[in-house]
Image (cartoon, rainbow, N blue to C red):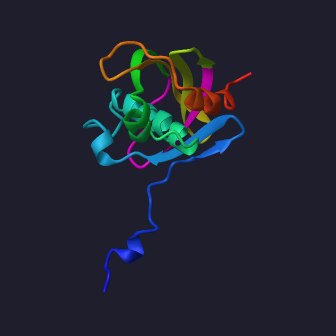
């Protein structure tokens, strides 16, 4: 009897594309909060990273596979964050990710973390494309072509 067979079809949720916006839901767990039950500020950066990763995965760009096949790595270069309202234990949040700018060796994504209709945090991620040596690397054509389909107007 193959006990793991029923679990073969279970995979983590990657969110979905709604037009050119990637929508990724998540729940706030106890581990995400401080002693007062409010999300610790640095954890919003983790939530945003998950949103960017799942945005790429939804497009068929799995970072580990791309790195193995092409040597390309996406490396956070700079980020701008604005905290507006706190999230709390058990809140359901939505991370929205939009591709704002695409260069030969860079990507800029704008993100918003929301609870219901309230925008809690905004984040702009400036991501560089590098090789395994850490030096800038032009994005492979197949990756850039896929990303161009999602570029914000």
Please name whichever residue, 3 or 78, is drawn nearer the observer in this view of the structure.
3
Please name whichever residue, 82 or 25, is drawn nearer the observer in this view of the structure.
25
The answer to whether one can see residue 91 in this image is no
Residue 5 counted in the magenta span = no
Labels in figure, total = 0
Please name whichever residue, 70 or 16, is drawn nearer the observer in this view of the structure.
70
The residue furthest bottom is 1
Residue 141's image quarter?
top right
Residue 76's image quarter?
top left
Residue 47's image quarter?
top left
Position of the N terminus, as image quadrant, is bottom left
- Please give left or right for residue 149 compared with residue 109 in the image: right
Residue 91 counted in the magenta span = yes
x, y percent for residue 31 = 28, 44
Q: Which residues are magenta?
A: 84-100
x, y percent for residue 10 = 44, 65
x, y percent for residue 9 = 46, 68
x, y percent for residue 90 = 41, 49
- Please give left or right for residue 149 compared with residue 141 in the image: right
Q: Residue at x 33, y 74 (%)?
A: 4
Position of the C terminus, as image quadrant, is top right
- Please give left or right for residue 137 compared with residue 141 in the image: left
Q: Residue at x 32, y 31 (%)?
A: 40
Q: Is the residue 28 above or below the residue 80 in the image?
A: below
- Please give left or right for residue 144 compared with residue 135 in the image: right
The answer to whether one can see residue 31 in this image is yes
The residue furthest left is 35
């Amino acid at each position: 009897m193959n006990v793991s067979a029923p679990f073969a079809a279970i995979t983590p949720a990657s969110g979905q594309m709604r037009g050119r916006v990637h929508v990724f839901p998540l729940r706030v767990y106890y581990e995400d909060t401080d002693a007062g039950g409010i999300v610790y500020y640095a954890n919003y950066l983790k939530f945003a990273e998950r949103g960017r990763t799942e945005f790429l995965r939804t497009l068929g760009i799995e970072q580990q596979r791309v790195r193995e096949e092409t040597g390309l790595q996406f490396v956070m270069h700079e980020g701008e964050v604005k905290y507006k309202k706190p999230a709390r234990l058990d809140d359901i949040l939505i991370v929205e990710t939009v591709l704002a700018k695409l260069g030969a060796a860079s990507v800029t994504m704008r993100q918003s973390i929301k609870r219901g209709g309230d925008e809690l945090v905004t984040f702009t991620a400036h991501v560089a494309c590098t090789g395994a040596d850490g030096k800038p690397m032009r994005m492979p054509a197949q990756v850039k072509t896929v990303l161009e389909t999602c570029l914000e107007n």
